[in-house]
Image: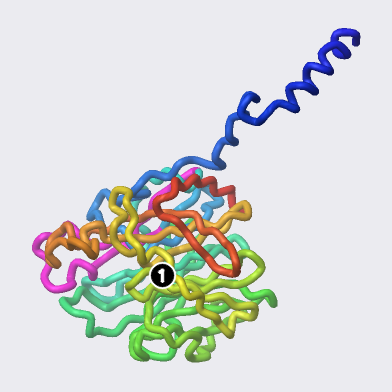
Amino acid sequence: MRTALLLLPLLVGLSLLPAAARAQAPPPAPAGHLAPKPLYRDPVFDGAADPVIIWNKRAKKWWMFYTNRRATDTVATGVTWVHGTRIGIAESGDGATWTYRDTANIAYRPQPGYTFWAPEVVEYKGQYHMFLTYVPGTFTDWNHPRTIVHLTSPDLRNWQYKSTLPLATDKVIDASVLRLPDGTWRLWYNNERDHKSTYYADSPDLATWTDHGPALAERGEGPKVFRWQGQYWLIIDPWKGLAAYHSTDLLHWTAQPERLLEAPGSGPDDQAIGGHADVVVSGGRAYLFYFTHPGRPKANPAPATSVAARRSVIQVVELHYANGQLTCDRDEPTYVQLKPGK
């Protein structure tokens, strides 16, 4: 006790010293693990795009599903390299380090040369549901029908066909699904026949759907809807960065003036605009998983038909919220720690 009393004046004196004279405490360690750039490259065709992230309850890992574009197919003509695609799977324990697993085993192949694009995956009562864009073949151009099909799986690996959704037209892509506060479900998608605007449909059970028409008039693909910071957000890809909208009722959307990922980054494979993204909210933080074409920087793009122009990679950046808007800095180190799902 006497020693403690003698030391007390010294400690008080030290606390009154100027800040520069005091020993500086080390800064707090960043939360999570530093994500590499690029975050992930597909080892088969080097064409990973359109990611969606979900917690795999059986594996106790995060799984990423993505469109497995055939970027390294040097004999592809027209846009056949973007057709004939399967859905790739990568796995991670924390969201920062990803390894290739396989392609999804989807038991729906009614036409030869079938094409799978842009999966959306949700879990409900122990069963996984995928809403997948299906194109009936491998084509040299974009002038062909596409539908959104509903698949289910007990394990995220093997998928069975349930139905083709009765949506507004025969040319629809890019589903995003969210459970509403009343327990029903809403699906947003891109209607290519209506100037590539965003439409929506509702379901009481993920099986029966009613289309309600336009949700957003702006042109853009890959709608993603999520809740964060006390409101709902809708992000779309208008091919000039990502446009962001917010809403309190999921019906009326207000655009924010600044797009995300429009300005190029400086990191490896991150100098082009960001495209078709997913958002994972975990531990109060929000992470934007997006893809880029590294060979398409605005300043010096590679030849359009080259492998360099076709290849695509997945990147991640943390979202921030200030003054009612979403922002992100793709050059800021991104530390990711996705917590296990419920």
Front in this rendered view, residue 334 or 48: 334
Label 1: element kind: loop
Residue 124 quadrant: bottom right
Q: In which quarter of the image is residue 324?
A: bottom right
Left/right placement of residue 302 relative to residue 250 reads left
- The amino acid type found where label 1 is placed reads Leu
Q: In this view, does 123 lie above or below 150?
A: above
Q: Which of 338 and 81 is in front in this view?
A: 338
Residue at the far right: name it: 1
Q: Where is residue 113 in the image (x, y as percent from the top left)?
A: 22, 71
> Bounds of the magenta span?
65-93
Total numbered labels: 1
Check disc 1 and report the residue beneath it.
Answer: 242
Q: Position of residue 149 (x, y in %)?
A: 41, 76
Residue 293 horizontal side relative to residue 241, left or right? left
Quarter of the figure that contains the N terminus: top right
Q: Residue at x 54, y 40 (%)?
A: 30
